[in-house]
Image (cartoon, rainbow, N blue to C red):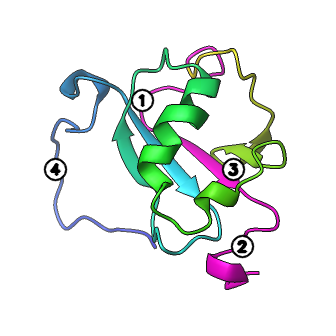
Amino acid sequence: MSVVALAPYSFPAKDVRANFALPLMYFGWDEHMMFCAPLAVPLDLETRFDALIAQVLPRLYGEHPDFARIDWKKVQWFQGSRLFTPRLDATLAEMGFKHKSVLRFRTPGLEGIRGSCG
C-alpha cells in the first residue's frame, strides 16, 4: 500500500544502528503462529551460528511445545527471503547479517502446534 504525504517532511530515522547498544536482528519461525510476528532482538553479530542455535533460539522460542522436537539437521534457514546454508562455526557478521537483518527458519515435520499449520 503506497503512502501519499500531504506536505513535504524530513526527519532523521530513529532506527539507525547508532541508536542501539547492539544491532537488532529479527527472528521468525515459519508456520508457528504462537509467535505472530518476527521477534526483534538486540544481538552481537559476532555470535557464532552454533551458539545462536544452542543459546539464543531456546530463550526466544523454548516455551513453544514443539521446540524440543526440532531436528536441527533438517531445518531450512532463510536470510530474509533467500534460502541459505549456515556455517555453524561462522559468526552472523561473517555470513552477511547486519543491523535489522531477518533470519527465518522452517522446521519440516513441525508445522504449527501439533501440525495446525501443515
Q: Secondary structure at mark 2?
A: loop
CB of mark 3 within 8 Å of CB of mark 1?
A: no
Residue identifier under label 1 = 99
Magenta stretch contains residue 109? yes
Q: Residues within 10 Å of mark 3 (few under 14, many from 20)?
A: few
Q: Is residue 88 above or below residue 74?
A: above
CB of mark 2 within 8 Å of CB of mark 3?
A: no
Q: Residue at x 31, y 68 (%)?
A: 4
User: Mark 1 belongs to which amino acid?
Assistant: His
CA gap between label 2 and label 3 equals 18 Å
Residue identifier under label 3 = 81
State whether the magenta stretch is mostly helix, strand or loop.
loop
Q: Which residues are magenta?
A: 93-118
**First of labels 3, 4 by sequence position:** 4
Number of dots carrying numbers: 4
Q: Is residue 29 left or right of residue 114?
A: left
Q: Is residue 58 above or below residue 46?
A: below
CA gap between label 4 and label 1 equals 25 Å
Q: Residue at x 72, y 57 (%)?
A: 106
CA gap between label 3 and label 4 equals 32 Å
Quadrant placement of the C terminus: bottom right
CA gap between label 4 and label 2 equals 44 Å
Quadrant housing residue 30: bottom right
Which label was assigned to residue 111?
Answer: 2
Pair 4/2: label in front: 2
User: Mark 3 belongs to which amino acid?
Assistant: Ser
